[in-house]
Image (cartoon, grey):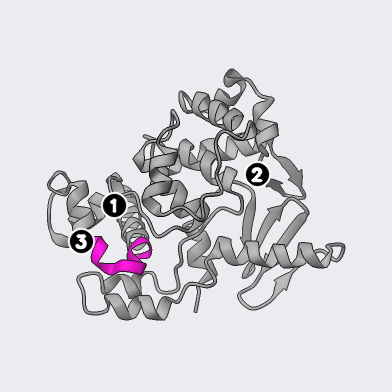
Amino acid sequence: MIDLKKVTHEMIKNKTWKYERGIFWQALDYGIVGFDGENFYLPYYLSSKEKKDAKEKIKFILGLNTDLERFYGEIQDSKFAFLIEEFYGLTVPAAPYKYQALVETIAQQQVSFEFAMRTIRNLVELAGRKIGSLYVFPKPENIAKLSVEEIKKAKLGYRAGYIKELTELHLKGKLDLSLEQFTEQEAIKYLTKFRGIGKWSAELFLLYGLRKNVYPAGDLGLRRGIAKIFGKRTKEVKEKDVREIIEPYGKWKSLLAFYILCYDRKTEMEQKR
């Protein structure tokens, strides 16, 4: 049901994973693990606990527990029905590590997705540990050792300062990223207390790092996608309009928002050709 090719197409191309010959490969702390849609490929030397953790990580990254048929049933009689055929088999990708989700979220602030991916790749090459042809995403300790100027070499601009500061707070235990027990609103309120994390960043982190049922309603791509679908101009679609349209879909609202974002990204790329 889940289409690995489509899911990986929408993932951040950060050099920590690859999709080759139908197999998704991900570099984790203990090695490179794979999944082909049915079977897991795990290093022989992993302990039983590590094998279990690796499988759970892959399931989390690829959203393998997503009930897409239920989702499609919810939108089949709506204005969004065409998205089913367009993105059949697509789930929301997530980061294997919460700290990675935070850094990659900050890197996406105020820039295009394509530019953000380049800066993230640069940072991974700068501070990540290489395993074969892939890298393990840099640990907070690795980033903390770098100066703001060194982080800026990844072309992160002012975001380098945010990443450095938030990393240090996280290492000191002052910024907790394990917010699973928080409600969405509690988590957003907590995260936005920190410099460098606005509402957009908090919502994106909760979706990408914890799989919370939230979405960045103020995101330009999401507003633009809704404008295209409903025949409006982007400036006519405000954050409140996005919420009024998406909130009724309840447990499927974050997945629907992601499909709309992917639709916008695809149509924007087609216009540039």
Foreground of the two, 143 or 182: 182
Residue on which the image places disc 3: 245
Magenta highlight range:
246-255
Identify the image quadrant of residue 47: bottom right
> What distance separates the C-alpha of mark 2 from that of mark 1?
28 Å
Element type at mark 1: helix
* Mark whose residue sits in front, 1 or 3: 3
Pick out the residue farthest to the right. 45
Q: Earlier in the sequence, mark 2 or mark 1?
A: 2
Query: Around disc 2, counting alpha carbons within 10 Å, would you say few (fewer than 14), some (14 to 19), or many (20 or more)?
Result: many
Foreground of the two, 229 or 140: 140
What residue is shown at x 58% (from left), y 30% (from top)? 169
Q: On screen, 116 above or below 27?
A: above
Q: Is residue 200 left or right of residue 235?
A: right
Residue 211 location (% of width, % of height): 48, 58
Mark 2 and mark 3 residues within 8 Å of each other at the beta carbon: no
Q: Is residue 161 left or right of residue 245?
A: right
Element type at mark 3: helix
Foreground of the two, 138 or 152: 138
Residue on which the image places disc 1: 222
> What distance separates the C-alpha of mark 1 from that of mark 3?
11 Å
Residue on which the image places disc 2: 137
Identify the image quadrant of residue 89: bottom left
Q: Is residue 58 magenta?
A: no
